[in-house]
Image: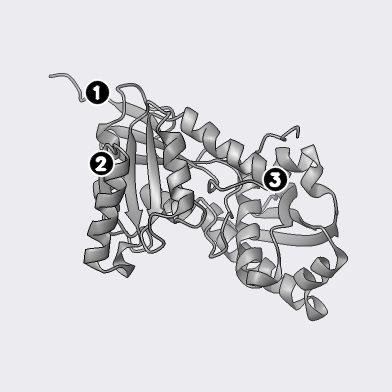
Amino acid sequence: MSETPTTCGYVAIVGAPNAGKSTLLNALVGAKISIVSSKVQTTRARITGIGMEGQTQLIFLDTPGIFAPKRRLDRAMVQAAWGGVDDADVILMVVDAVRGYDDETREILKRLKEQKTPVVLALNKVDKLLREKLLGLTQAMNNDFPFAATFMISAEKGDGVGDLRRDLARRMPEGPWLYPEDQLADVPMRFLAAEITREKLFNALRQELPYAATVETEDWKDQKDGAAKINQVIFVERETQKKIVIGEGGAMLKRIGANARREMEEQFERRVHLFLFVKVRGDWGDDPERYEAMGLDFPKA
């Protein structure tokens, strides 16, 4: 009796900013590997998450929210998003059901019509919408676009996520797994550590800090006792932003650091000694090295 063949493939998760893509990725993988924040456009580079469904390995590409780019950083993020689409066996279109069928979603679907790759629709946050409105939204979107399947989910609560993962698994091509069965992400630890701190930064400051901030892991040392000593720099564009991040008497920076360290210790399953520094670099948004550190290609124009 022959063994059941393995299948493996790529799923690109796309959608407008704040549709819940990162939350869904974490739910599909079963662990937190992508930044989740109430601020929009927090995913800057493609995060590769790895999920298992029976004999199928699903490699998820969580792309930045697709929006109308204004700055160089915006263009790099949108470029990364569409790059994820080109690599995929299946495209998973995530739509915030509460926000509905808005102009941003229409623009994304217009471009997806050029793709031959099957597109699965996931209407997210359905627990916050009346059934009648949800059915109307489903019909309107399926009238406009030939989705391979439609799922109604709540990524935050996990409702419908299992059914969605099983459907994606059956669409994957036959082939060997590309990663060990217990691996959850193809993300360098230094990058993941920076993403954790960036999330805590955004969550702590909400509207006070614009997107002109990034975090880089400058140094990571594994110590003899098994702990990790991590030095990170928070780059901001102006001195006033630096003061906001540090806070009175350093209180805000300590809070951000404590929250980030706790999550790193959970994620990495080891003690972490985290040291945060804040630097002003007004032109970091035009610095190719900063883009490389974020895993993005530097747009030439």
Q: Quadrant of residue 4?
A: top left
Numbered label attached to residue 5: 1
Residue farthest to the bottom, as pictured = 248
Question: In the image, which is nearer the foreground, mark 2 or mark 1?
Answer: 2
Residue shown at 26%/46% (left/top)?
150
Q: Is residue 25 visible?
A: yes
Which residue position is annotated with label 2?
A: 149
Tell me the amino acid under the disc marked 3.
Leu
The residue closer to the viewer here, 100 or 123, is 100
State the CA–CA distance, disc 3 to disc 1: 42 Å
Q: Residues within 10 Å of mark 1 (few under 14, many from 20)?
A: few
Tell me the amino acid under the disc marked 1.
Pro
Which residue position is annotated with label 3?
A: 73
Residue shown at 70%/45% (left/top)?
73
What percent of the width, then of the height, locates residue 285?
A: 77, 47
The residue closer to the viewer here, 188 or 23, is 23
Disc 1 element: loop
State the CA–CA distance, disc 2 to disc 1: 24 Å
Instruction: Of the two numbered discs 2 and 3 on the same chain, state the one appearing first in sequence.
Output: 3
